[in-house]
Image (spheres, helix red, strand yellow):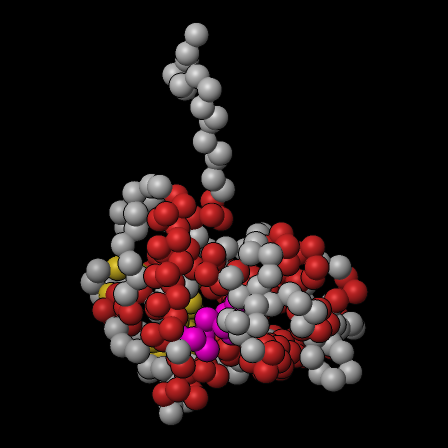
Amino acid sequence: MATKKQAGRPAAKKRSFHQELVLNRWMLGFFQGGNLAALKQRLGEDRFEGIDEDGQTQFFHELTRNLFNVDRISEADLRRYDLTIVAHWQSITSQRNKLEGHELHMKYFQYLSLLFTEIYLDWYFNHRQDLLDGLNAEMVRYRAEAGAEPFKDFDADDLNKVAFWNATGSGKTLLLHVNIKQYLRYYQAGKGEHYPDKIILLTPNEGLSRQHLEELHLSGFGFAQHFNKAQTPPRGTIEVIDINKLGDEMGDKTVAVEAFEGNNLVLVDEGHRGTGEVA
């Protein structure tokens, strides 16, 4: 007797959320195994944390043991990415190491977040057409595999937005600080300018704004302050504002979104919050 499923036909295998993330799929194509679990299996041991005598991470040395796709990325580029990550990480943890009395090391998932960022920013600033073509080729594979309502192709205007999904307690604040340094390094090399018009950090509430300012100063960012619409701070200042103060128009306690128009770096903490609200 047949039920709603036709007799003899196997049920469709449920797809995971990760399989729907086209950018994530494209990025994992740089590495052998094609998924995060394969990288965790090789990089997840504590012995890979820390810096080797040559200044590279232990993660880098393990990656060079047949763990990255040599057709997609050269070892020289991987080495350069790794050294840049080390420099940024040491910069933001220097004061913390002194206060805590021990050296903070990256976990494998933190390192991979930063490595993925390095690859993306390098391609965004220096190989943008290749990035666009690569993402759209991955989109073609996704459509063929998913058999669902297809997304439209990426276009160049889509490429300036990247979201990170990291677990609670995974050190997202430190990663965000390194992300700022990563972006500015590529921006300065590609634009010939030191800073974009504004660097804005949006937070969910005032309490987190205060916390972010404390953390930014601890990471060695000398120019960070609460956003003040009456002031024009020096270029390169990180202006922190909670999202509740944004509005359609200027008010006594709100700032019109148009005040931030320009060539800006905008970072959003807890970006998933409020996605179901009209405001």
Q: Position of residue 120 (x, y in %)?
A: 46, 71
Residue 194 appears anywhere in the view = yes
> Looking at the image, is 137 positioned above or below residue 130?
above
> Which range is magenta?
116-124
> Which residue is most to the front?
8
Front residue of 88/213: it is: 88
> Which residue is most to the left?
249
> Which residue is most to the top?
1
Q: Position of residue 190 (x, y in %)?
A: 39, 86
Find residue 152 and report its image quarter: bottom left
Q: Is residue 205 left or right of residue 259?
A: right
Residue 29 belongs to the span the image colors magenta: no
- The residue sitting at 48% across, 83% down in the picture is 185
- The residue sitting at 40% across, 81% down in the picture is 126
- The residue sitting at 66% across, 62% down in the picture is 108
> Looking at the image, is 10 positioned above or below residue 230?
above
Q: Which SS does the magenta portion mostly show?
A: helix
Front residue of 164/20: it is: 20
- Disc tally is 0
Front residue of 40/117: it is: 40
Find residue 197 and report its image quarter: bottom left
Residue 120 belongs to the span the image colors magenta: yes
